[in-house]
Image (spheres, grey):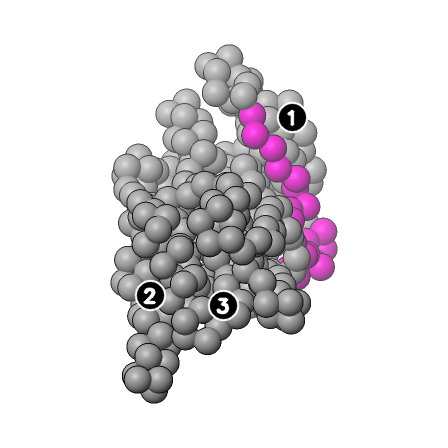
Amino acid sequence: MDHVKRIGVLTSGGDAPGMNAAVRAVVRTAISCGIECVGIRRGWQGLINSDFIRLSSTSVGHILSRGGTILYTARSDDFLTEQGRKKAVATCKMLGLDAIVAIGGDGTFRGALELSRLGIPVVGIPATIDNDVGCTNYTIGFDSACNTAIECIDKLRDTMQSHERCSVVEVMGRNAGFLALYVGIAVGATAVLVPEYETDFQRDVVQRIQDSRLAGNTHFMIVVAEGAGSAVEFGKMIHEAIGIEPRVTVLGHLQRGGSPTGRDRETATRMGYYAVKALAEGRGNSIIATQEGGIVEIPIEEALSRTKKLQMDRYRIMETMQIGGIREFRENTQ
């Protein structure tokens, strides 16, 4: 790759708190390296449509704490076609872009791989609240989404405890249970249902609620990952099985919003810095990832081939917190 003089930066797929911090880091690192930076609005579709904005240090000066993405984001069916990708390449040539920094998840990176095969170097930065990108331990936005969900559930618990009710809360996560399990441990959930772990409704929900009630609890919190099933349906099943009427809350896109946490701001800044440094030093077609607390570069094809398993030790920890309380109650009442 020849010396990079001008790069583009875009955000694609679902938005995640911390994307703006990553954009800021890309722009300011690029400027420090003598590289111009162009913002591509609305993801890969914006690259096809030549939807861009010139970015400067000043223009990203007050976005570190903002949620969402100033570059907007969208999914692009056109980019899935050969014709659409050729239009994207034409835009890169017209704007004089030597490379692209793409911020998003696996879908974004699959697009980056296709663009790189057409001769445009790309570096990806993982940002998704699902934390389901296989090549990295952590994705931008996960911590913020967890904290938002925890705050909402803590407030919900206050009123549910007052009325001695069962709560069923659905959190995001698509086909991954990372968010649900993390939140479930943090709020002391009665049960957590995730797609990676086949649910035995009688054992994993009904029995947990019954044991918790026998231990003296009058409020029960069930956290459901959206990929594990509908919270509404689980609520109906609980009512039919036990006779109590749960209150169902679907947090939905509320989890995507809000100011990013310190962890997401700091991680996004480091990733943005290393993404530009890789391009400035002649490397491209990679994903910037976190491993064991450090930052590494992984070739896109290899990155996309990796998978990430749910940490079942956390699931066992969650179960132990419930079992310990129930066992202590039984021993004290015998």
Identify residue type, mark 1.
Ser
Residue tagged by mark 1? 50
Instruction: Read off the residue under disc 3.
Output: 187
Ranked by sequence position, the earlier of labels 3 and 2 is 3
Q: Is residue 44 above or below residue 209?
A: above
Residue 65 locus on image (x, y percent): 66, 61
Residue 11 shown in magenta = no
Mark before the other along the chain sequence, 1 or 2: 1
x and y, in percent, of residue 257 in the image: 64, 52
How far apart marks 1 and 2 lie (CA) works out to: 52 Å
> Could you tell me which secondary element the residue under label 2 belongs to?
helix
Please state which of residues 193 and 136 is positioned toward the viewer in this rendering. Answer: 193
**What residue sits 51% from the left and 41% below the top?**
233
Q: Camera-side residue: 151 or 52?
A: 151
Question: Which quadrant, please, contains the C terminus?
Answer: bottom left
Residue 128 visible, this orientation: no
Residue that appears at 68% across and 49% down = 56
Q: Amino acid at mark 3?
A: Val
Which span is picked out in magenta? Answer: 58-76
Q: Earlier in the sequence, mark 3 or mark 1?
A: 1
Residue 132 image position (x, y, % from top left): 40, 46
Residue under numbered circle 2: 319
For residue 322, above or below residue 264: below
Q: Amino acid at mark 2?
A: Glu
Separation (CA) of disc 3 from disc 2: 13 Å
Q: Residues within 10 Å of mark 3 (few under 14, many from 20)?
A: some
Residue visible at 67% across and 29% down in the picture: 51
- The part of the image, by quadrant, that contains residue 258 is bottom right
Count of numbered circles on the image: 3
Few, some or many residues within 10 Å of mark 2 (<14, 14–19, 20+): some
Question: In what element is the residue under mark 1?
Answer: loop
